[in-house]
Structure formats: structure tokens, C-alpha cells
Amino acid sequence: MKIVLLGPPGAGKGTQGIQLSKSLMIPQISTGNMLRKSVWDGTALGKEVQSIIRDGKLVPDELIISIIEERIAQEDCGDGFILDGFPRTLEQAEALELVMPESVDVTVYLNVPTGEVIERLSERLTCRECGAVYPKQDISICPSCSGALYQREDDQRSTIEQRINVYMEHTAPLIEYYCKQNKLVEIDGMGEADEVFDRIENGISGVISQ
């Protein structure tokens, strides 16, 4: 099964992607985590995208598409994958269809109000190692893998508004794009993570059975 996770920054795509990956036993592919790791590791790719990520802008289509194309060609994606953070534009969605025709089985759209998004983003920490996200609290080590927790540059208040504006302009149109293909399930992203996950599982089952 090939799934796209869609929604504004802070909607919970990363958290739900991890759960879906465990449940369906297919890899979660987070372009954001891949790019941030490249920045942290100081690779050539990281140096190229560092300022783009810091400013809350979109990585150029041709670059992110090549990264995704290489990743989904790997052996562990044979039974499917979960795309978290890609596609982010109509052009990227169309490019994905060229690489793998009818490659998306279902798109899960996590609907979360803007006010909640701002609060979540400004009040969270991310693990440098596994990418897990936690509300700000008195811990500095990831409970899952013991990696260091930090506040991402693009989660700082000075960048959040820019990220939301970019999402509304470039990514939100994908809601209609996948809806027209009857591949969209809209999920209320508010509430406890387990509650949201139950809604996602039910939503996916409904779309696949059509």
C-alpha cells in the first residue's frame, strides 16, 4: 500500500506515520527528516538546503523528486511506503505519477486548525536521531532512542507563519487534487494520538474498499 500523509506543519504527520509504518510494516519516508539529517551531518545536500529549511521555504522540486525517486526504488519499499512531507506541490504530485503511475493508493489529510498548528510547532522538541517529536518538557533525551532533543529552526515562531503561508499556497491545493481521484480521506487531527490513529485506520479502510 502506498500512502501520502497530507496536512499543515504540526498536524501530526510524523507521529501518525510512525504508527502506520509499524501497523502496515512498510517504511515511513519523511523527506523533512532526511533533509534535516543531511544538514546535521554536514553533507553536500545539507549545505545546499540548510538556509531553505531555516527560512521555512520549499526545497526545489527537481532536488526533492530525485531524492524520493531514489528512496522508493529501494528494496524495503517493495510492498509499499508512507510519504510524509512529499508531495508538497501539484508539480511534485504529477512528477510522482510519472515515476510510478497510479502510485498513490490513499492520501490521509490531517485537518488541524491554524491556531493549534502554531501552538504545537512552537511548543515541541524533535529528536536528532529518530525524528520523534515531543511537547516541550523537562527532558533533553529522546525516550525512544536516547537521541538528543532540540527545537528545530523552522519550529521557531519567527518561521512558523512563513511555513503556514507556504503550505496554504503550495500544498493545500493537493487536497482537491487527490479528492478528484477519490483517493483522499479527511481526518480530524485533534485529540490524543491514539484517537487520531484509529480514525486514520478506519478512513483508509473505507477508501480502499471503494
Image (cartoon, rainbow, N blue to C red):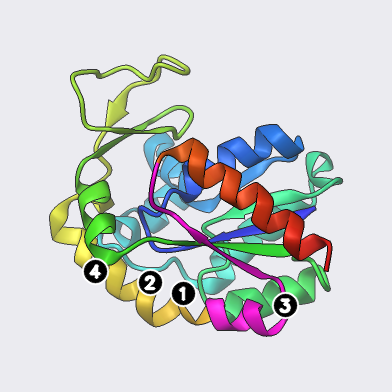
* Kind of residue at disc 3: Asn
* Mark 2 secondary-structure assignment: helix
Q: Position of residue 22 (x, y in %)?
A: 67, 32
Task: Tell me if label 1 and label 2 are in contact, CB under 8 Å.
Answer: yes
Q: Position of residue 112 (x, y in %)?
A: 37, 61
Instruction: Residue lying at the far left in this picture: please name it.
Output: 158
Q: Nearer the viewer, mark 1 or mark 3?
A: 3
Is 178 located above or below residue 73 in the figure? below
Distance (Cα) linking label 1 and label 2? 5 Å
- Mark 4 vs mark 3: which is more N-terminal? 4
- Give the quarter of the figure containing the C terminus: bottom right
Q: Nearer the viewer, mark 4 or mark 3?
A: 3
Q: Residue at x 20, y 25 (%)?
A: 137
Say what amino acid the circle numbered 4 marks.
Gln
* Mark number, residue 182: 3
Mark 3–mark 2 CB contact (< 8 Å): no
| Magenta extent | 175-191
Q: For the residue marked with disc 1, what is the amino acid?
A: Thr
Q: Which residue is mark 2?
A: 167
Q: Which residue is mark 4?
A: 162
Give x and y (percent) for residue 173.
49, 82
Cα distance, mark 4 to mark 3? 30 Å
Give the CA separation, mark 3 to mark 2.
Answer: 22 Å
Q: Amino acid at mark 2?
A: Tyr
Q: Is residue 104 left or right of residue 144?
A: right
- Count neighbours of disc 4 (C-alpha within 10 A) and say few if under 14, some if 14 to 19, many if 20 or more: some
Residue 171 badge: 1
Left or right: residue 47 compared with residue 75: left
21, 97: nearer the viewer: 21
Residue appearing at x 48%, y 29% in the figure: 130
